[in-house]
Image (cartoon, rainbow, N blue to C red):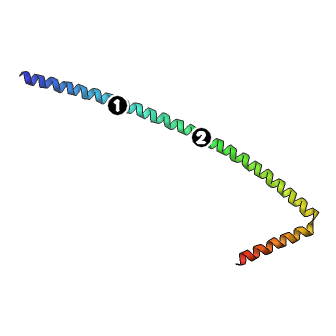
């Protein structure tokens, strides 16, 4: 009977160890879920900041490009007013070249 008592004690010890390991594993899983949730939130905030910065940069670039295009347009209008015949000749030559390219 001593052996069956020792065997029962060993089984109880193993069961207690298994329960302790199960609790530890559950705690680690819970902690891991919390960590993943925090990491996800952090990445979301970072991506939002990046998107906002990219939008600001795009708006600034578009405004600068618009200003440059307006300046170019003003210069072109000034040239056409100063030299209307030359402007017509240049426009005709460009049109002719486009027609040759498109015809091929």
Report which quarter residue 103 is drawn in. Answer: bottom right
Task: Provide residue 81's location: percent of width, then percent of height.
Answer: 92, 62
User: Which residue lies at the image location 47% right of the left edge and 35% below the top edge?
Assistant: 37
Report crowding for label 1: few under 14, some 14 to 19, many 20 or more residues within 10 A (C-alpha): few
Tell me the element at label 2. Answer: helix
Looking at the image, which residue sits at the far right? Answer: 82
Mark 2 or mark 1, earlier in chain:
1
* Quarter of the figure that contains the C terminus: bottom right
Tell me the element at label 1. Answer: helix
Report crowding for label 2: few under 14, some 14 to 19, many 20 or more residues within 10 A (C-alpha): few
Return the mark for residue 48.
2
- The residue carrying mark 1 is 26
Looking at the image, which residue sits at the far left? Answer: 1
Task: Provide residue 63's location: percent of width, then percent of height.
Answer: 76, 48
Task: Provide residue 83's location: percent of width, then percent of height.
Answer: 93, 65
Return the mark for residue 8.
none
């Amino acid at each position: 009977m001593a052996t069956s008592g020792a065997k029962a004690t060993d089984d109880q010890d193993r069961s207690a160890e298994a329960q302790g390991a199960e609790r530890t594993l559950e705690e680690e899983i819970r902690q891991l879920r919390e960590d993943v949730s925090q990491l996800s939130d952090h990445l979301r905030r970072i991506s939002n900041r990046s998107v906002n910065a990219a939008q600001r940069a795009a708006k600034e670039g578009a405004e600068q490009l618009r200003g440059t295009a307006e300046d170019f347009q003003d210069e072109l209008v000034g040239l056409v007013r100063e030299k209307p015949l030359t402007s017509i000749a240049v426009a005709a030559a460009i049109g002719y070249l486009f027609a040759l390219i498109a015809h091929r």
